[in-house]
Image (cartoon, coloured by chain):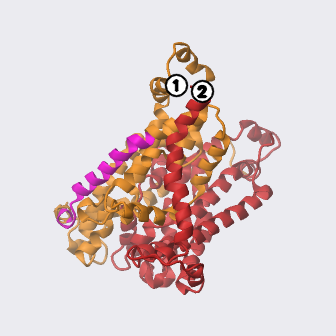
Chain colours: A orange, B red
């Protein structure tokens, strides 16, 4: 029967740690392979049997990657889209969530059902008409279509924040109402500061969404000067004809660095978010 | 101003966005799907001809098959993997935080870069996977360059990313009342019985949620497929097919009709899964 007692517990622990180590190796293998290739000259990349580690750190792949695409510029392009949209997206989503969480008005339940329905509706259905709309406005080769819609709030963020704001006790607004403060002031001075952890969580979700988005950026951006890091990487092989795996791995490595930093230093906000809502961004 | 009016003001920005970016495009999409629109030039109303053309296009069925086959295999695989990992790290052992972070990584670290790295791992001659297999004397397949091995290539990537869903399961595991396990222990249940009769039934709501999310994810799969491709059109998932029709061939009407079909498929499958809910998903009686 099952493992019991102190001896059983030790065996169990040993088995689990073996599983963790094996899992860790599998999870990190792609990164090990990427970094190892990034530091190898072609003669060590295209060789059999395989060389798992470079014989010395070969930095030329990074230089060559910069010659193929302007990586820093593309990263800054992505960052500027993110900066332009995230503040507005978080603020407006919080505004709307506050309305849903703490007020009663006619049609509120129906509006909320519609909000939930739009979370289920695939973006693909509205994608083409929205694209045609922006083309007619002459804004299709710009960041406007990627940024502006964020200023009307995002359904999943509103849903998440509404849940968070609903947990505040009903009494918190009372003293400020007594002092004659407007509800917008209450929102700004009280609700936003109290909701800071949740706002940070959705801010990070929004940043990752922008950093990793390919389809939206692919549709709207044509001018290589406006390329984002995702578009730059996706077009890398087209720029070089045959695939230059060394420089491409160096470029991929640089593109992943910001995200890896977020993972290491801000993971708890994602985890708290999932715990709070049971949903994934 | 009355408090109820103020509440309405707070949701007004979203309501405006709803009209501009959802209601209006949906109405437009109904019309566009019945035209031969190609961005340039005037469109002609052609009724349901786009739908007729789609249903007689072998490439449509191919994309549907690629997507469905992937969904049927990848969803159970990823759910089982994520569940296994969650069960294994659901303790307070030393260093567990580090392992959780490593297993959680794929949900944050993704996009084109990761897809490119996998393409290189799967390279038949110099890739990491076939190099590893060679150590054991196995000659690996040509993966993405052999139409029979394209699907397994995508499944390998799916399994690697599966543990990214870790914390959803961990949160659900924490929510299971301790009394249930205590009662099971008193009744003489071992750990296997506890998992079978307490843990799994209590997790069914989250399994249901992941089933639906996984289904939508498969039908929306784009980035990986766009980067990896695959021999013999085996990497043309539904969204890649739709994207090509719209933005390579500028068949906007045709592509919009494809989007509606996608919507109906997702809705239909979700409703079917939802119908089966009462047979296997645990619900707390209120």
Residue A14 percent location from the top left of the image: 55, 49
Disc 2 to disc 1: CB gap under 8 Å: yes
Report whether residue B46 is seen. yes
| Residue at mark 1 | A183
Which residue shows up at 53% across the image and 56% down it?
A: B22
Q: Is residue A201 shown to the viewer in this render?
A: no
Q: Residue at x 55, y 86 (%)?
A: B58
**Residue B94 at what x, y percent from top left?**
50, 40
Q: Is residue B49 magenta?
A: no
Relative side of B103 to B182, left or right? left
Where does the magenta region start and end? Answer: A65-90
In the picture, measured across the screen, residue B199 lies left or right of residue B35, that is right
Residue B210 picture quarter = bottom right
Kind of element beneath mark 2:
helix
For discs 2 and 1, the disc positioned in front in the rendered view: 2
Q: Nearer the viewer, residue A204 or A18?
A: A204
Magenta residue check for A68: yes
Label 2 to label 1: alpha-carbon separation: 9 Å
- Give how far across and how far down residue B34 sits, in percent: 55, 75
Residue identified by numbered label 2: B3
Q: Main secondary structure of the magenta part?
A: helix
Closer to us: B132 or A205:
A205
Q: Chain of mark 1?
A: A
- Using the image, determine if residue A69 lies above or below residue B233: above
Q: Is residue B142 left or right of residue A272?
A: left
Residue A247, given in percent of the width and then of the height, sits at: 23, 66
Give the structural element (helix, strand or loop) at label 1: helix
């Amino acid at each position: 029967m099952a493992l019991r007692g102190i001896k059983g517990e030790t065996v169990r622990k040993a088995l689990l740690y073996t599983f963790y180590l094996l899992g860790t190796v599998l999870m990190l293998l792609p990164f090990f392979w990427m970094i190892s290739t990034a530091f190898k000259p072609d003669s060590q990349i295209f060789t059999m049997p395989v060389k798992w580690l470079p014989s010395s750190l070969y930095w030329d792949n990074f230089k060559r990657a910069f010659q193929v695409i302007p990586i820093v510029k593309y990263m800054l392009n992505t960052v500027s889209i993110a900066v332009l949209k995230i503040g507005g997206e978080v603020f407006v989503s919080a505004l709307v969530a506050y309305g849903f969480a703490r007020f009663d008005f006619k049609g509120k339940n129906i509006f909320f059902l519609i909000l939930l329905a739009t979370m289920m509706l695939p973006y693909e259905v509205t994608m083409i008409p929205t694209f045609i709309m922006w083309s007619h406005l002459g804004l299709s080769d710009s960041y406007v279509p990627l940024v502006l819609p964020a200023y009307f709030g995002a359904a999943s963020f509103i849903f998440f924040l509404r849940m968070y704001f609903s947990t505040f006790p009903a009494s918190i607004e009372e003293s400020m109402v007594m002092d004659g403060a407007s509800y917008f002031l209450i929102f700004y001075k009280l609700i936003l500061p109290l909701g800071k952890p949740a706002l940070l969580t959705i801010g990070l979700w929004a940043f990752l969404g922008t950093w990793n988005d390919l389809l939206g950026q692919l549709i709207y951006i044509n001018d290589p000067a406006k390329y984002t890091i995702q578009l730059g990487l996706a077009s890398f092989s087209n720029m070089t004809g045959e695939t230059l795996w060394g420089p491409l791995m160096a470029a991929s490595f640089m593109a992943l660095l910001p995200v890896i930093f977020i993972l290491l230093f801000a993971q708890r906000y994602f985890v708290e978010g999932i715990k709070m809502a049971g949903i994934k961004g | 101003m009355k408090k109820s009016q103020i509440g309405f003001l707070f949701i007004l920005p979203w309501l405006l966005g709803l009209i501009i970016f959802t209601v209006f495009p949906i109405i437009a999409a109904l019309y566009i799907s019945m035209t031969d629109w190609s961005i340039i030039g005037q469109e002609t109303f052609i009724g349901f001809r786009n739908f007729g053309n789609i249903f007689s296009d072998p490439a449509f069925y191919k994309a549907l098959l690629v997507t469905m086959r992937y969904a049927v295999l990848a969803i159970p695989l990823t759910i089982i993997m994520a569940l296994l990992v969650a069960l294994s790290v659901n303790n307070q052992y030393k260093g567990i935080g580090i392992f959780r972070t490593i297993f959680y990584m794929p949900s944050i670290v993704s996009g084109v870069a990761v897809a490119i790295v996998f393409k290189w791992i799967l390279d038949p001659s110099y890739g990491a996977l076939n190099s590893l297999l060679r150590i054991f004397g196995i000659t690996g397949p040509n993966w993405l360059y052999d139409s029979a091995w394209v699907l397994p290539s995508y499944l390998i990537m799916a399994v690697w990313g599966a543990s990214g869903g870790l914390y959803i399961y961990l949160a659900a595991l924490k929510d299971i009342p301790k009394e249930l396990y205590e009662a099971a222990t008193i009744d003489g249940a071992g750990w296997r019985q506890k998992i079978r009769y307490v843990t799994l039934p209590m997790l069914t709501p989250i399994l249901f949620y992941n089933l639906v999310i996984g289904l939508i994810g498969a039908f929306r799969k784009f980035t990986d497929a766009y980067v990896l491709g695959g021999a013999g059109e085996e990497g043309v998932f539904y969204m890649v097919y739709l994207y090509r029709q719209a933005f390579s061939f500028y068949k906007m009407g045709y592509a919009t009709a494809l989007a509606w079909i996608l919507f109906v498929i997702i809705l239909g499958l979700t409703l079917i899964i939802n119908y089966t809910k009462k047979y296997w998903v645990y619900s707390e009686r209120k």
